[in-house]
């Protein structure tokens, strides 16, 4: 089963915003844990609202992802990015 994102789901401005938020997210990840069906990312130095905006945009272009944000505010925030078979390889390729 091939996992494909639909970049056409974005306007040009949304595409740029998604790209900027993804760059910030990757820079904010301080730890990655492997899960049975994906990965959990420990996120620092990214606001709750920016992380939620990233998740909203990511769901539009890659609807096969299950996205769960655990924690908020000054405490630890974990982003769980999971999905169907093949999602771990997809995440590794796209988010490395």
Image: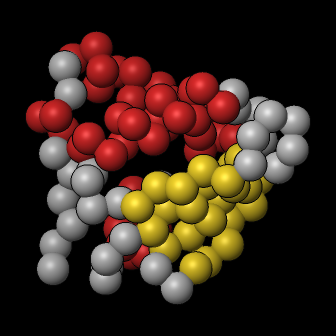
Q: Is residue 35 above or below residue 65?
A: below
Q: Is residue 70 above or below residue 24?
A: below
Q: Residue at x 45, y 41 (%)?
A: 55
Q: Residue at x 47, y 35 (%)?
A: 54
Question: In the image, is 72 to the left or to the right of 15?
Answer: right
* Front one among 52 and 39: 52
* Front one among 4 and 56: 56
Q: Residue at x 39, y 29 (%)?
A: 18
Question: In the image, is 52 to the left or to the right of 61?
Answer: right
Quarter where residue 2 is shown = bottom left
> How far from the left and from the top, in percent, is residue 32?
68, 65
Question: In the image, is 68 to the left or to the right of 74?
Answer: left
Residue 19 seen in render? no
> How far from the left and from the top, in percent, is residue 1?
15, 80
> How far from the left and from the top, in percent, is residue 48?
66, 31
> How far from the left and from the top, in percent, is residue 79?
61, 54
Q: Residue at x 75, y 40 (%)?
A: 72
Quarter where residue 45 is shown = top right
The furthest residue to the right: 74
């Amino acid at each position: 089963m091939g996992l494909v994102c639909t970049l056409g789901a974005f306007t040009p401005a949304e595409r740029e915003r998604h790209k900027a938020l993804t760059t910030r997210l990757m820079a904010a990840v301080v730890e990655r844990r492997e899960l049975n069906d994906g990965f959990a990312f420990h996120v620092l130095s990214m606001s709750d609202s920016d992380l939620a905006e990233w998740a909203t945009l990511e769901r539009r272009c890659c609807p096969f992802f299950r996205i769960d944000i655990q924690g908020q505010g000054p405490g630890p925030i974990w982003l769980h990015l999971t999905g169907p078979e093949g999602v771990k390889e997809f995440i590794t390729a796209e988010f490395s």
